[in-house]
Amino acid sequence: MENGKLGVAIHGAGNVAHAHAASWMKNPNVEIVSVSSRRRETAQRLIDDLGLDCPAGDDFDAVLADPRADVVNLSGPNHVHAAQGIAAAEAGKHILIEKPMAITMEENRALRDAVEKAGVRSIVSFVLRWNPLFENIKSLLASGAIGELFYAEVDYWHGIGPWYHGQAWAVPSKTGGSSMLLAGCHGVDALRWFVGDEVVEVAAVSNNKLGFFEYDANVAAVVKFRSGIIGKTSVLLDCQMPYSFNIDLVGTEGTLRDDRLWSKKLLPGQTDWATLPTVLPNSGDVHHHPFDAEINDLVDSILQGRESHCNVADAYKTHELCMAIDRSIAEGGRPVKLPL
C-alpha cells in the first residue's frame, strides 16, 4: 500500500473493465496504478475514457512484478483467467477475476489451490449477488417469509449473436468454454446462493438451434440438492427476446417469483402478489451491474482480513456444477454426481 491506499492493476481492458475501473475509482481506499491488456492501445483507451493518471501496458509479467499493485483485476477473455489468476496468487496479489474463472476442472482445482496456498483475498465476479433484488430475496428467505424452500429455479436468457463484441473468443469451445460457463454460470451461481446447500447430482439436455456457437447454446438442467430441494436452471443464448433473469423460489408457506412475493405468513391480508420496489437484474449491460458493492466487499475483505462470500473457494463450486452440467450433456443427459 502506498499513501495508505491499495494499488489496483487492471489487466484486460474490454467493456467490463471500464465498469470495473469506474467502480474502483469510487472507493476511497484504492488507487488504480496501471491498466494493461493484450494490446496497449486498448489499455490507453480505457485510461483516456476515464481520465486516469496511470501508465498503459501490455506485459502481464510486469504487472505481477509491480510492487505498487496490491490487487490485480483480471478481465481478459475466458480462457486466460485461470492461468493469470494462478500467477497473480503466486505473486502475492489479491484478485478480482471475471467469470468464468476457469473452463476446465483442472484449471478450476489449480486456481482454487493456488489462492488457498497463497492466502490472498479474492472475488469472482458473480456480481448479481450484490443486486438489490438478490439482497431482498436473501433477507426474505432468512426471515422464513416463504417457509421451507423445496423448489428453486433460476434461468439466464440472453440472445447473443454476431453483434457481440467478444464473439472472437466466446464462440469457439476452446476459448469460450460452453454456454453455461460463458453466461449461464450467473444463473447457476444464483441458484446456489439462494438455496445455500450443496448439489449432489445434476442431469442436463441441450440443443444448438441457430448454430452460432461451436457448443450447444441452449441448456436446461435439473439439480438435486443434499437436503432434497429440487433445482432447475437454464441458459438460452439463441432466444429472440429482451434479456431475462428468471427467479422462482417455492416454499411451504409462500413463493417468490422475480420481484413478486406471496406470503400469507408475512402478509396475512394478502389478496394478490406483492411487488418488491427494488432494482432488478434485468439488463445484460455491464454498467447496470452492482460492481460498486462487489469491489467494496473485496476491499473490505482485504482491509479486515476476512473472506468474501464470493471468493475463489466458493466460486469453485459454481464452476464445478457448470462443468457437471456440461458432462451430463456430453454423456447424453446421464445424471452426474458431485463433487466431481
Image: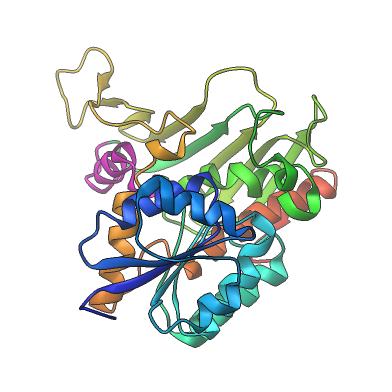
Q: Is residue 119 visible?
A: yes
Residue at horizontal 38%, vertical 77%?
70
- Camera-side residue of 87 and 338: 87
Residue at horizontal 29%, vertical 31%?
279
Residue at horizontal 69%, vertical 56%?
323
Residue at horizontal 64%, vertical 54%?
77
In this picture, residue 205 sits left or right of residue 41: right
**Quadrant housing the C terminus:** bottom right
Q: Which residue appears farthest toward the top when viewing the image?
A: 271
Q: Is residue 99 visible?
A: no
Residue 186 at x, y percent in the picture: 52, 45
- Quadrant hosting residue 247: top left
Q: In the rendered view, would you say 240 is above or below 212?
A: above
Magenta-colored span: 129-145
**Quadrant housing the N terminus:** bottom left
Residue 49 at x, y percent in the picture: 41, 45
Residue 110 at x, y percent in the picture: 64, 77
In this picture, residue 212 sits left or right of residue 45: right
Residue 245 at x, y percent in the picture: 48, 31
- Camera-side residue of 337 and 276: 276
Is residue 215 rendered magenta in the image?
A: no
Q: Main secondary structure of the magenta part?
A: helix
